[in-house]
Amino acid sequence: MLIVYIDADACPVKDEIYRVAARYAMRVVVVANATMRIPTSPLVELVVRSGFGAADDAIAELIGPGDIAVTADIPLAGRCLLKGARVVDPRGREITDNEIGHLLGMRDLMDTLRQSGEVTGGPPPMAAKDRSRFLSKLDEIVNGVRRVHNKA
């Protein structure tokens, strides 16, 4: 069964994921560092792992081929791709094997620039178009995974 894993602590599109998952009757595993409110549904599960990196480690351990990870964390995205999962960030950009190396390198460069004071700030706030793009991309990925799974 297709499972969507949410890197939930800072995820701004949880409600959108719950709506898509309900439409397709998919399981959702919400992984966080602390307890949070989730929908009352037998298809939605909360996994709490406290400690630095523990939530990421849990997702990387649990996710499998054909599952979907929703995360903005580039190293976690790489770990999920290695397990055969699909990855989408909260702004609707699918992260693939073809670009993960570039994204990891860019992440490291930006981290170095931030630490040196050359770059400050972070990404712009989420806009309605970001949410719309995310919903469209998640729907596209879910349908793609379902087509492949139904052929097997």
Image (cartoon, helix red, strand yellow):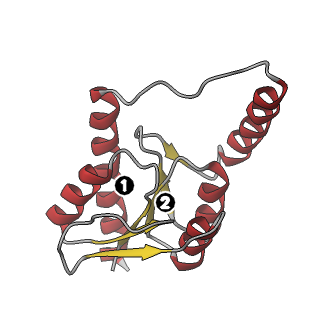
Q: Look at the numbered disc 2 and give the secondary structure of its residue.
A: strand
Amino acid on which the number 1 mark rests in the picture: Ile
> What residue does disc 1 label?
141
In the rendered image, residue 141, in percent from the top left (x then y), is placed at 36, 54
Residue drawn where x is 73% and y is 46% of the image: 101
Residue drawn where x is 59% and y is 78% of the image: 61
Let me know if residue 150 appears in the view: yes
How many marks are shown on the rendered structure?
2
> What residue does disc 2 label?
86
Q: Look at the numbered disc 1 and give the secondary structure of its residue.
A: helix
Residue at the far top in the pictured view: 118
In the figure, is residue 31 to the left or right of 145?
Answer: right
Observer-nearest of 137 and 52: 52
In the rendered image, residue 138, in percent from the top left (x then y), is placed at 33, 51
In the rendered image, residue 110, in percent from the top left (x then y), is placed at 74, 31
Amino acid on which the number 2 mark rests in the picture: Arg
Q: Quadrant of residue 55?
A: bottom right
In the rendered image, residue 32, in percent from the top left (x then y), is placed at 47, 65
Residue drawn where x is 53% and y is 28% of the image: 123
* Label 2 crowd (10 A; few <14 / some 14-19 / many >=20): many
In the figure, is residue 126 to the left or right of 57?
Answer: left
In this rendering, the answer to whether 100 lies above or below 42 is above
In this rendering, the answer to whether 28 lies above or below 126 is below
Residue drawn where x is 42% and y is 44% of the image: 90
In this rendering, the answer to whether 141 lies above or below 103 is below
Quarter of the image with the C terminus is: bottom left
User: Mark 2 near mark 1, Cβ–Cβ under 8 Å?
Assistant: yes
Observer-nearest of 36 and 8: 36
In the figure, is residue 118 to the left or right of 60?
Answer: right
Quarter of the image with the N terminus is: bottom left
